[in-house]
Amino acid sequence: MKIRTRLVLAFCIIIFVPILIVFTAYMLLGFSNFTSETMLRLKENLSGLSVDAIASGALILILTATILILWIYKGIVPNIRKLTKAADCIKEGDLEFNISGNGVDELSELCDTFEEMRIRLKTSAEQRLEDENEQKMLISNIAHDLKTPITAIKGYSEGLLDGVANNSKKQEEYVQTILNKAIEMDNLINELTLYSNLDTSRIPYNFQKINISDYFQDCTCDISMDLSHKNIKLIYTNYLDPDVVCIADPEQLARVVNNIVNNSVKYRGEKDSKIVFSLHDAGDFVQIDIKDNGIGIPKEDLPYIFDRMYRGDQSRNTSAGGSGIGLSIVKRIVEDHEGKIWASSNVGKGTTMSFVLKKYKQ
């Protein structure tokens, strides 16, 4: 039964039941021969009621009942209609509405709760749409970036089969190029795997105490060998005490450094390229600066370079390759180490990536 029907019935009961009782008593007493003193007095009182008095009483009952019913109706039905309309909108997938309550009663609280649910649903839907767009962009970027090494591998393999590389030196160059392109593909696939782990918070960390000076000495030695083949000079300076220790995952920390260095290599300038590593004491933290003299990052792009899938027009363009998630992975790993990362850059002069790691204290 609808609330409106219930209220109409309640109105009728409030009005007519008292009238019916008085009328019935009046009729019964009018046709009865009661002799007791109490009943005789009741009969005299009812007999003395005039039509005007009965009408006035009935009118007061009607007005009172009307006011009460309208008050109850306005306090319940409008909010229920709002909730019904909101439920219909959600059913149709429309979350662009407002359903805040206008009072302090239970139905108004229910409307406010419904509004909070709508906001959460809308936020979740927007986030899901954003994630879907990012995934589509990631797949597009990975597909685009895989084409280049695959094409190179295919071309050099055909060259070997066709006898284009007709001497051992040229054959070695072809094989080395194929190997480099295979490594590039492997890095892209690893990046994609780590990206999926980022979303599910399943990065396999293995935290341990490491001596920062020893770690970065070994790390820069390995990187220096790779950079020398690309005619890039590496400069390493360490201003730390030799016994400074941090809690970190060596493998993931190496991923941070390699991703930053790979970015520097991708966006190096035409002049003699160099990358400068420097370690500094920053109170309770160790600060690592990695500076290059590449093409730099435009000022308008700088606040967004750690966002997933972000690529600027110049410093992070698609022609340089990359999935667009490298620096977002770096940021996540550094933050999971209770650190912080930031960047400064000048177009045409280079970029400095800086991050801090918390020192270990007994």
Image (cartoon, rainbow, N blue to C red):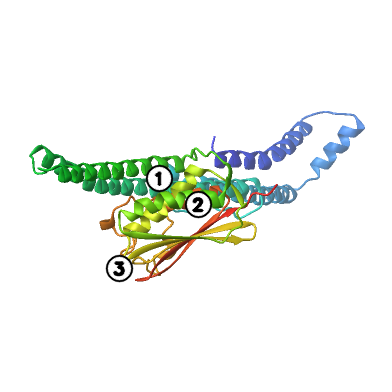
Asked which quadrant contains residue 240, the reply is: bottom right
Left or right, residue 29 beside residue 163 = right
Q: Is mark 1 on a helix, strand or loop?
A: loop
Q: Which of marks 1 and 3 is nearer the N terminus?
A: 1
Q: Kindly identify the residue that appears in the image at 44 percent across and 40 percent down.
A: 197
Q: How many labels does the image show?
A: 3
Relative depth, front residue between 209 and 1: 209
Asked which quadrant contains residue 350, the reply is: bottom left
Classed neighbour count for the residue bearing mark 3: other residues with Cα under 10 Å, few (<14), some (14–19), many (≥20): few
Q: Distance between the residues labelled 1 and 2?
A: 53 Å
Residue picked out by circle 3: 271
Q: Kindly report which numbered mark, 1 or 3, lies closer to the viewer in this rendering.
A: 3
Q: Position of residue 174 (x, y in %)?
A: 18, 44
Residue 311 visible in the picture: no
Q: Position of residue 82 (x, y in %)?
A: 51, 49
Residue 72 visible in the picture: yes
Residue picked out by circle 2: 216
Left or right, residue 312 beside residue 91 = left
Q: As shown in the figure, which amino acid type bears the numbered disc 2?
A: Phe
Whether label 3 touches label 2, CB < 8 Å? no
Residue picked out by circle 1: 93
Q: As shown in the figure, which amino acid type bears the numbered disc 3?
A: Lys
Q: How far apart are marks 3 and 2 (CA)?
A: 27 Å
Classed neighbour count for the residue bearing mark 1: other residues with Cα under 10 Å, few (<14), some (14–19), many (≥20): few
Q: Position of residue 285 (x, y in %)?
A: 61, 57
Q: Kindly identify the residue that appears in the image at 32 percent across and 62 percent down.
A: 268
Q: As shown in the figure, which amino acid type bears the numbered disc 1?
A: Gly
Relative depth, front residue between 134 and 63: 134
Compared to residue 321, the image places residue 302 above or below, namely: below
Q: What element carries label 2?
A: helix
Q: Earlier in the sequence, mark 1 or mark 2?
A: 1
Residue 105: assigned label: none
